[in-house]
Image (cartoon, helix red, strand yellow):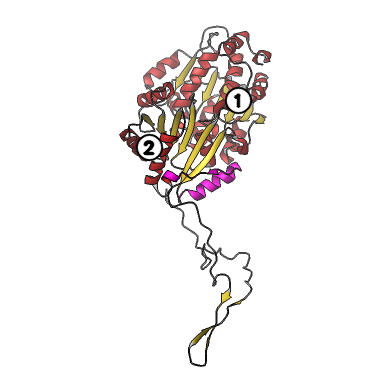
Amino acid sequence: MFSQLTLHERLLKAVAELKFVEPTPVQAAAIPLALAGRDLRVTAQTGSGKTAAFVLPMLNRLVDLQGPRVEIRALILLPTRELAQQTLKQVQLFAQFTYIKAGLVTGGEDFKEQAAMLRKVPDVLIGTPGRLLEQLNAGNLDLSHVQVLVLDEADRMLDMGFAEDMERLCKECANRQQTLLFSATTGGAALRDMIGKVLNDPEHLMLNRVSQLAEGTRQQIITADHDQHKEQIVQWLLSNETFKKAIIFTNTRTMADRIYGHLVAKEVKAFVLHGDKDQKDRKQAIERFKEGGSKVLVATDVAARGLDIDGLDLVINFDMPRSGDEYVHRIGRTGRAGGEGLAISLITHNDWNLMSSIERYLKQQFERRVIKEVKGTYGGPKKVKASGKAAGVKKKKTTDKKGGDKKVAAKRKPAAKAPRNAPLASADGMAPLKKRAPAAE
């Protein structure tokens, strides 16, 4: 029960107002340790309630601050505008019965208006690394009095190339008393390096191993012959699947616009969201999608983090994401907070190896699905039987008494063992495979 946590009565009043009764596993594990002042490194799946797990202890530290507001006391770093805006709303809801004020600094908003907001000195500042550094370099931002630093979706920020920006901002918070780092994936070497630099004797909490992520979501693949075939499958799914809301993910803005155009031509109510859209259009698309103005959102990975939309129960990967972590974040938009969802990935022959590597990463096997109405010719890689020659069979010819060729039963000779470092055989067993040059990005 939240009432059993040693939170300030004003925060417990807000929790009750929001009808939160039982803390989620990540909240139950992280909040007591954070209240005790420990640095934390927490891995928990999307939709698990990790925002409240760092916001509530952070606010608890600030709730009894006395005197005029002259210093920023807490900083929350996030990778995207959408996630930052969503986190601001959460902070405001939990702080509604306190005097704590929060501010937002992200790209896509008026720089001078943000500078004016910073002069009012919010207690909690929420922002993305790039714009925060711009305000810092302009002399509009003082982080020397920050007590609590939160790095949310730290792995994503590193993936986006914010490592140096994050380190600089962490150094600006040199007098902090606590650092909390949350992510939905375990990340890689870059994340481990960041943890070593910014956390002080942290408690490590792994609420979900990779193989347990998205347990409430059915994961399917449907094979396709080419992109045009994928578009036909998408049309069939949107016409025949039962869903409240769906997101279609692509890897490029061009493909997102193309799919959106085809949907509109078929009179499907849809919105498109990607990096070329200005902030006003992005806000409008997300708000209308949340409100039910359309059932379909076509998006690049700009929407893969931070979107928490009620009723989103279908994710379609038109393009397979480029990494296992990105796949986890995409399908994490559905099946949130214990709900059920369906994630479908469309796979051509170019996608198969990437899909297989993601299966291995997740230690799962996706369900194979065939839709007879839009079935294509590609069904995955075929196992090619070795030819007689490849199997070590040698045929002899002899000449009969009349001078004609006569077939003699083939003699099978035992296959020689290949040297340990011999090149691999090709799929037909005839010739060694050459190393393929890396594809240009």
Q: Nearer the viewer, mark 2 or mark 1?
A: 2
Please tell me which of labels 2 and 1 falls first in the chain: 1
Q: Position of residue 150 (x, y in %)?
A: 56, 25
- Of 79 and 367, the residue lying toward us: 367
Q: Amino acid at mark 2?
A: Ala
Outermost residue on the bottom side: it is 401
Counting other residues with Cα less than 10 Å from the Cα at mark 2, is it few (<14), some (14-19), or many (20 or more)? many
| Residue pointed to by mark 2 | 256
Q: Is residue 249 visible?
A: no
Q: Position of residue 267 (x, y in %)?
A: 32, 31
Q: Secondary structure at mark 1?
A: strand
* Residue 159 is a magenta residue: no
Outermost residue on the left side: it is 265
Lateral position of residue 76 relative to residue 227, left or right: right
Q: Is disc 2 in contact with disc 1, using a CB cutoff of under 8 Å?
A: no
| Residue pointed to by mark 1 | 179
Q: Amino acid at mark 1?
A: Thr
Q: Secondary structure at mark 2?
A: helix
> Start and end of the magenta stretch?
350-373
Above-or-below relation of 9 to 404: above
Q: Quadrant of residue 106?
A: top left
Q: Which residue shows up at 46% across the image and 27% down it? A: 244
Q: Which residue shows up at 46% across the image and 34% down it? A: 241
